[in-house]
Image (cartoon, rainbow, N blue to C red):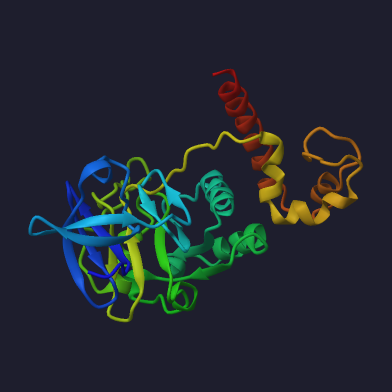
Amino acid sequence: MSDKFYRVITHKSNEFEIFDGSETLTVKARGKLKRDGEILVGDFVTVEEKNGEMVIKTVKKRENSLIRPAVANIDAIVLVVATQPKIDYFLVDKMIINCKRMGIECIICLNKSDLSREIFDELTAQYKNEVSAIVAVSALNNEQSELYPYIKDKLVCFAGQSGVGKSTLTNSISGTDREVGKVSEKIGRGKNTTTSASIIITPSGLWIIDTPGFSMLDVFEEDYRTLAGYYDEYVSLADGCKFHPCTHTSEPDCKVKRAVESGLLNKDRYERYLKIFEEQKIAYKNAVRR
């Protein structure tokens, strides 16, 4: 069989369902490829026949990968937020940072947008210069056409807090009928309903990774002094700072701090930046000690 590439769309135990755009195969992995973590949903693989069964031969080098959930070669992450549960802006900030670190496009999608215009305006004020797009949809009312141009011809993950409507949005776009969780009235949070990562291929050709529990990203352990480099608005002002590089925290004569004080930059987002900076500083120093 020729070494054409298939994409892994599901993984259960030692069996993988793979797809090349027209043909779907169920194959197995052997040898070192059989070990957990060697093959992820989203990987591109070649196959061969051995002892009468189809097995994975090679795995193409990944463009990127996530640990939780374990998926690979993501083109874009759609960060879904909603009026309920209340938006965790720290989560939004960290998602954007990690997308930039891994070279993954980030799109913010406000679901349940029929319930509040103010939240969309707030998201725009804070993130209009930091993500590819900010769109508003209502998955429950089957109104998500504004999102389509940003996810066409891409492998996309829907991420966000539990209860924001990721499964409802996936169902609405894909025409599937996955279980949908509800937001708990007692704690204001949702329950995750998806249990395993898989790729949904819609009739219109959209590729969506159904990701279980994809709401948090681990804090990364690179040098905390590089954090400002993931804030495009801060990078654009950094040349005006007295010190180079400037972390925009305790340094005097910092143009970023002046922009925050004057209202040019969002104060809430900057204050979260300071907290993430300290969090990263602790994580980095602990990692160095190990």
The quarter of the image holding the C terminus is: top right
Q: Number of callouts in the render? A: 0
Looking at the image, is 246 positioned above or below residue 135?
Answer: above
Q: Position of residue 37 (x, y in %)?
A: 32, 43
Which of 186 and 238 lies nearest the eye of the viewer? 238
Q: Position of residue 96 (x, y in %)?
A: 56, 52
Furthest toward the top, the residue is 289
Residue at 52% from the left image edge and 70% from the top image edge: 135
Does the image show residue 171? no
Q: Position of residue 253 (x, y in %)?
A: 91, 40
Which of 206 and 133 lies nearest the eye of the viewer? 206
Which of 207 and 113 lies nearest the eye of the viewer? 207
Residue 72 picture quarter: bottom left
Query: As drawn, is 232 to the left or to the right of 1?
Result: right
Q: Position of residue 106 (x, y in %)?
A: 53, 61
Does the image show residue 28? yes
Query: As drawn, is 28 to the left or to the right of 243?
Result: left
Residue 44 picture quarter: bottom left
Query: As drawn, is 284 to the left or to the right of 244?
Result: left
Which of 87 and 107 lies nearest the eye of the viewer? 107
Residue at 48% from the left image edge and 63% from the top image edge: 76
Residue at 69% from the left image edge and 37% from the top image edge: 274
The quarter of the image holding the N terminus is: bottom left
Query: As drawn, is 90 to the left or to the right of 8?
Result: right
Looking at the image, is 11 positioned above or below residue 279?
Answer: below
Residue at 61% from the left image edge and 25% from the top image edge: 282
